[in-house]
Image (spheres, rainbow, N blue to C red):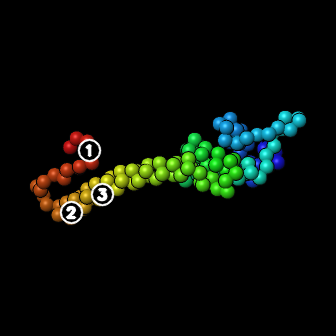
């Protein structure tokens, strides 16, 4: 199939496919007249790349999965290098979740204090203090 058909079947653009080719992720074979040609295995590579990118993997992180498929494995994540990328990504996600949980807890405490102060509305009472940063 030619580049336009592959792009349509993969739900992407020909520009994206040329970019993947330039990054060495998508091999392009050429016909005698210079047209790029692709087959079903290329579509499979693209689907792997797109799925991983939809999950937040950057393009370079997809490389071990693509190489695994190219090596003839039934799945892109059945090779040690792919598993290492999964482990690294999980570590990054766990770290981000931890950071977000800390921020959420701080905001929840600040909201609880603010709601108590708003309910009390005691004239002359202490000024509420924002603990999220900045000068009072």
Mark number, residue 116? 2
The answer to whether residue 6 shows anywhere in this view is yes
Tell me the distance, in whole angstroms, between the alpha carbons under discs 2 and 3.
17 Å
> Pointer 1: what residue?
133
Q: Residue furthest left?
A: 124
Residue 58 screen position, x and y as percent: 55, 44
- Residue nearest the observer in this picture, 68 or 101: 68
> Pointer 3: what residue?
105
Kindly indicate whether the residue at mark 1 contacts the one at mark 2 (C-beta within 8 angstroms).
Answer: no
Q: Residue furthest right?
A: 32
Q: Residue at x 19, y 50 (%)?
A: 129
Q: Looking at the image, is 123 positioned above or below residue 88?
A: below
Residue 78 screen position, x and y as percent: 60, 55
Q: Residue at x 20, y 43 (%)?
A: 136
Q: Residue at x 22, y 41 (%)?
A: 135
Q: Report the mark closest to the observer, 2 or 3.
A: 3
Mark number, residue 55? none
């Amino acid at each position: 199939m030619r580049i336009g058909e592959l792009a349509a079947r993969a739900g992407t653009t020909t520009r994206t496919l040329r970019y993947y080719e330039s990054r060495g992720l998508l091999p392009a074979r050429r016909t005698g007249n210079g047209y790029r040609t692709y087959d079903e295995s290329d579509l499979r590579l693209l689907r792997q790349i797109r799925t991983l990118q939809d999950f937040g993997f950057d393009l370079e992180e997809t490389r071990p999965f693509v190489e695994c498929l190219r090596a003839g494995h039934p799945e892109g994540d059945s090779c040690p290098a792919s598993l290492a990328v999964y482990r690294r990504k999980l570590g990054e996600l766990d770290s981000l979740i931890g950071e977000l949980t800390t921020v959420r807890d701080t905001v929840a405490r600040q909201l609880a204090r603010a709601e108590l102060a708003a309910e009390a509305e005691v004239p002359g009472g202490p000024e509420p203090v924002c603990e999220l940063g900045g000068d009072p």
